[in-house]
Amino acid sequence: MEQINAIGRRKAAVARVYLMQGKGNITVNGKDYKAYFPQTHVQGKIVQPFHVIEVDNSIYDVKVNVDGGGYKGQAEAIRMAISRALVKLNEDFRSPLKSNKLLTRDARVVERKKYGKPKARKSFQFSKR
């Protein structure tokens, strides 16, 4: 098996994933993913595609370059990219990943600020007199 690459996006985060045969190491920007994401609920998002297809993640090495956004957006971008790479590897993985909505791009982003308002929709306090 050669190197399989895929891209995932969420909010402002973009993740490039390289999947290859290995011992189960997941590195994010040169660090182990448990050191990069210290929160356990975020670590679970990264390994979720492997749990959904019921494949032990110790078979593959995953190298990730992620940029932009916060830690949650980055984790979900990585999750999407790993899912796409697994589908490139084996087309049979598509239906369980799709049914768990791991292949769908979540297009929700922050609404832009409008002029004359402090935030996107919030208004200044109204004074009648």
Image (cartoon, grey):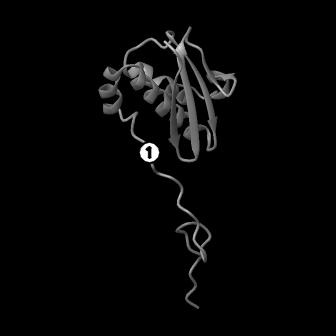
Of all residues, the one furthest to the right in this rendering is 30
Residue at position x 60%, y 29% from top?
39
Q: Quadrant of residue 99?
A: top left
Number of marks present in the image shown:
1
Give 123 or 18, whichever is nearer the viewer. 18
Query: Which image quarter is the C terminus in?
Result: bottom right
Q: Is residue 91 left or right of residue 10?
A: left
Residue 122, given in percent of the width and then of the height, sits at: 55, 69
Residue at position x 32%, y 26% from top?
96
Neighbours of disc 1 within 10 Å: few (<14), some (14-19), many (20+): some
Give 22 or 102, whichever is nearer the viewer. 22
Of all residues, the one furthest to the front in this rendering is 2
Residue under numbered circle 1 = 106
Residue 101, given in percent of the width and then of the height, sits at: 36, 35
Q: Is residue 31 left or right of residue 105?
A: right
Residue type, label 1? Asp
Residue 44, given in percent of the width and then of the height, sits at: 50, 25
Residue at position x 55%, y 12% from top?
24
**Element on which disc 1 rests:** loop
Give 122 or 4, whichever is nearer the viewer. 4
Residue at position x 70%, y 24% from top?
30
